[in-house]
Image (tube, rainbow, N blue to C red):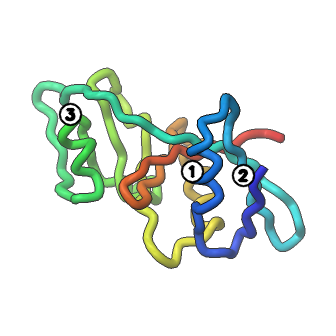
Amino acid sequence: MLPKKFDNQIDFTNIFQELKKGLDRRVQIGIIDSDKDVVYYVIKNIEWPNTKMKEGQNSTIDDKEVTELLEKGYQINSGLKFGTHYRVYNYESKHAPWLIHVVEEGINWLDIARMVRVGHGVNKTIVLSYEKQWLSIEWIKP
């Protein structure tokens, strides 16, 4: 488990190191609050397979951060109502299975905890876009 202090700015260095090992286990982080309580998350690399957009649907977003998904046929719309940048649909989905947040300078682990809490409550996976990499983050019970 990789500990992360809730008010620290995001640094994925040790997370990427763990993911690159390719071990047959999950990468787990614990976000620690000021009372020393810990909330646990699993982080995974995301590979986006090709899909196609549903007939009559289109994406309303034109952002270089999500160009890869648009080129692979995903429908992308605003994620504002879920507190993220985007919501993402594939051909099979009636509702967006993923919420994407583009990680920018100044974001901290508390911001991520908020996103994951909302995503979990609406049955969606939070995906972080960071330096052209895609990371899913899911809350788990210890």
Q: Nearer the viewer, residue 12 or 89?
A: 12
Number of marks in picture: 3
Across and down, in percent, residue 109 comes to 64, 65
N-terminal label among 3 and 1: 3
Mark 2, residues whose alpha carbon is within 10 Å: few (<14), some, or many (≥20)? some
Whether residue 73 is situated above or below residue 31 in the rendered picture: above
Across and down, in percent, residue 131 comes to 40, 60
Tell me the amino acid under the disc marked 2. Answer: Ile
Tell me the amino acid under the disc marked 3. Answer: Gly
Residue in view at x 67 percent, y 29 percent: 24
Cα gap from disc 2 to disc 1, whole angstroms: 18 Å
Q: Which mark is residue 73?
A: 3
Residue pointed to by mark 2? 29
Q: Which mark is residue 118?
A: 1
Residue in view at x 69 percent, y 75 percent: 7
Tell me the amino acid under the disc marked 1. Answer: Val
Residue in view at x 45 percent, y 64 percent: 103
Mark 3, residues whose alpha carbon is within 10 Å: few (<14), some, or many (≥20)? some
**Can see residue 105?**
yes
Cα gap from disc 3 to disc 1, whole angstroms: 26 Å
Residue 3 vs residue 121: left or right?
Answer: right
Residue 88 vs residue 138: left or right?
Answer: left
